[in-house]
Amino acid sequence: MSDPCSFSSLSRCLTKHLNLLLHADFDRHVIRGKVELTVEALEDCFSVLTLDTRDLNVLSVSANQQPASFALGTKHSFKGTPLDITLPFELSRGQHVIVEVTYETSPSASALQWLTPEQTAGKKQPYLFSQCQAHHCRSMIPCQDSPSIKHTYYAQVSVPKDLVAVMSAVRDGQMVDPQDSSRIIYRFRQTVPMPSYLIAVVVGALESRQIGPRSRVWSEKELVDKAAFEFSETETMLKTAEDLAGPYVWGQYDILVLPPSFPYGGMENPCLTFATPTLLAGDKSLSNVIAHEISHSWTGNLVTNKTWEHFWLNEGHTVYLERMIGRSMHGEPFRQFKAMGGWKELQDSVNTFGANNPLTNLVPSLQDVDPDDAFSSVPYEKGFALLYHLEELLGGPEVFMGFVKSYIQLFAYSSVTTEDWKTYLFTYFKHKVDVLNQVDWNAWMFTPGMPPVKPQYDTTLADACIALSQRWIKAKDQDLNSFTESDLKTLSSHQVIEFLSLLLHQDPLPLTHVKKMQEVYNLNTCTNSEIRFRWLKLCVRSKWEESVPLALKMATEQGRMKFTRPLFREVYHFDKYRDESVRVFVAHRGAMHPVTSGLVAKDLKVDASSTGVL
């Protein structure tokens, strides 16, 4: 079993536990670290192990407190640098060793973003957050950085006393740092084995509010009450998920609202889901992202893809479970409606990559491919479409959810491949093997482009969106006065999002139409980020010059890749403003998360190392 994204000795040894001592140095933008890895040998005469690192300064290595020799190998463009450690003794299969590595991260560590006070909501204190998925943990901790390896961890984090540390673990007290009375050490323990990409640390001027019996929301004080209101349905979602998938094993379920540069909608770090502030719509309408992250507590965190090639096992099942939570809370028409929206997102990704691009396979090969470059809605929505197709073939949502729950129970605490999943599917539905054999597995799994089957979703909630979008598409200039602000008043925010998505899947609207839409619906003032994003895309595509600064403002005042990359791309394709898109990106790239700025640079064909254009 090998992982194309890792150098570490996965078949020869496995990490069982990490003990972390981390010191956050805000002056130098580095973490000084010491990690003790409890490693089990999987073969006899075991004496050399390899860990993943990226840009780490390794200072010393010991094994069972005896000095161990070590060497860093050749640096690879995205995998980093292997750290080869030679033990001063040999182990037999099944024996354990504690390997201790003292090291320091680089100021440019890809897992870490150090924010200046100006980049935070409070403007007074600096802020640090990590984002380790998919393969960035190695830039923060030397480890076996593969989702096939799961371990527990304990941690102590030393931070300046005005700041608070939280991690993807249960909080376990704090004390004054014995080495420096101006600092506090926060302690954490994670007793459920998990992969390295789920280790997360945040240091900032954080406050929290209780929002449920096992949940708090954390953020800077400027956002904490807003976040507590927005995510007040968390316990209901947790209980609904438990009814569907089995008990929640992680103890605490907290939510941390990050500063705007966080690149994702959410990140399912155990015990501490990370969420973008773009979810704070004021009406709980975007809290389905929390349902998604809660679902990851089972699919992803408890049952994990063995390598990133099988990422759809994490994400397809999580989208399926998220929509089942939505079904329980809002009814089947809502699930159908969200599934239709997902199909459009899949079409967008396939169009962006190109229908023949192997990265649109459900199970892509990642040999020599940076997993960040492969990131898209394909594993989420193509994965969901497959599971929904199987649900229809095998007897409906209750029957198929029975399989999903059983799959979670069987593979809990382990990592799986698509083959493991498929073998169990055939075992569970052994009386329906003839039905399963009719599925074109090769077309679903290993063929690029859209899935071989398009599901027929119920359009009850979509019909009003379709009707309104068709009116706009067919309207002549003299018909524009027939539109009024009441058109949108009867639609939920989910339906407004769908209405705008439908318009984006057509030829660009005439500029007269877009200007009229602003006049009647006043969408420029909308604060729901999903609506605003689609509206600005629509405006730029119709060549409305006044919308360009608004689009670039949204692209830079938050850094969620789902919004930032397409908005920059849209302005870049508006020939008159191509240079402006590059100029604004270069001016703001320093405030962006490294993963985001790297991908936007590729989108805009900007040289990654300079301010010039390629």
Image: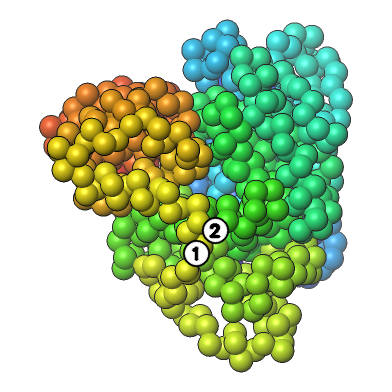
Mark 1 is on which residue type?
Tyr
Q: Quadrant of residue 350?
A: bottom left
Task: For mark 2, give the secondary structure.
Answer: helix
**Depth order, front residue of 43/165:** 165
Question: From this viewpoint, is residue 209 visible?
Answer: yes
Label 1 crowding class (10 Å Cα cut-off): few <14, some 14-19, many 20+?
Answer: some
How far across and down, in percent of the image, does residue 471 sit? Answer: 28, 47
Report the side of 495 relative to 416 (left or right): left
**For the N terminus, which image quadrant?**
bottom right
Label 2 crowding class (10 Å Cα cut-off): few <14, some 14-19, many 20+?
Answer: many
Q: Which mark is residue 457?
A: 1
Q: Which mark is residue 393?
A: none
Report the side of 60 relative to 513 (left or right): right
**Depth order, front residue of 105/596:** 596
Question: Which residue lies at the image location 43% right of the left edge and 54% below the top edge?
Answer: 463
Mark 2 is on which residue type?
Gln
Q: Which residue is mark 2?
A: 336
**For the C terminus, which image quadrant?**
top left
Q: Quadrant of residue 612?
A: top left
Task: Indicate whether 36 appears above or below 581.
Answer: below
Question: From this viewpoint, is residue 574 visible?
Answer: no
How far across and down, in percent of the image, does residue 604 sit? Answer: 26, 39
Do tag 1 and tag 2 residues touch (Cβ < 8 Å)?
A: yes
Question: Which residue lies at the image location 75% right of the left edge and 8% below the top edge?
Answer: 182
Task: For mark 1, give the secondary structure.
Answer: loop
Q: Quadrant of residue 89?
A: bottom right
Question: Which residue lies at the image location 47% right of the left edge and 38% below the top edge?
Answer: 490
Question: Which residue lies at the image location 81% right of the left edge and 62% below the top edge?
Answer: 91
Task: Give the colouring mode of the picture.
Answer: rainbow
